[in-house]
Amino acid sequence: MSDGVESPPLQATVVAFINATNAFDIERALALFSTTAVIDDPSTGSSFNKHAGVRDYLERYFLGYHTVTRLLSLERLGDVRARVRVDFTGDFGHEIGLLLVALDSAGRISRIDASLE
């Protein structure tokens, strides 16, 4: 019963992120992130910091590779964190990814720790 009340903001943000990147709408995706957000993705060999870094990541790895993401599962880890399993396809082929997503107090994405299965 409480999942119906608490989970929509977290799940809605994740779904909005996937929808924006699938539409290759970098501005809409970037608007979901805090200005101090971090994306740590060891598969790229880099960490991407603040809006400039997040933009770089989105442009390089979503727009640049024509990445389409499909949500496979979302496991809540409290009110503002989730483990998200996704299916990625694009110019690189096909990968299954795991995103640990954290939101700040304003409901914006503050951190994504990404890995491939």
Image: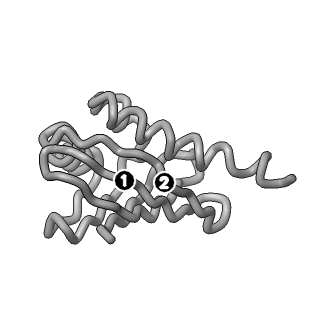
Residue 39 showing in the rendered view = yes
Q: Nearer the viewer, residue 89 or 115?
A: 89
In the image, is 81 to the left or to the right of 46?
right
* In the depicted structure, whether residue 20 falls above or below residue 100: above
Q: Position of residue 109 (x, y in %)?
A: 46, 50
Residue that label 1 marks: 87
Identity of the residue drawn at 61% across and 68% down: 77
Task: Tell me the crowding category of disc 1: few under 14, some 14 to 19, or many 20 or more residues within 10 angstroms, Cα based.
Answer: some
Residue type indicated by callout 2: Leu
The foreground one among 86 and 29 is 86
Q: How is the image coloured?
A: one colour
Determine the residue positioned at 56% across, 57% down: 74
Tell me where residue 49 appears, x and y as whole percent: 26, 57
CB-based contact (under 8 Å), mark 1 and mark 2: yes
Q: Secondary structure at mark 1?
A: strand
Q: Which numbered disc, 1 or 2, marks the residue that appears first in the sequence?
A: 2
Residue 103 — which label? none
Q: Which residue is mark 2?
A: 72
- Residue that lies at the very extreme toward the right in this rendered image: 1
Tag count = 2
SS state under label 2: strand
Q: Position of residue 73 (x, y in %)?
A: 53, 57
Q: Amino acid at mark 1?
A: Asp
Answer with left or right where residue 44 lies relative to residue 80: left
Q: Residue 92's spot in the image, x, y percent?
A: 13, 52
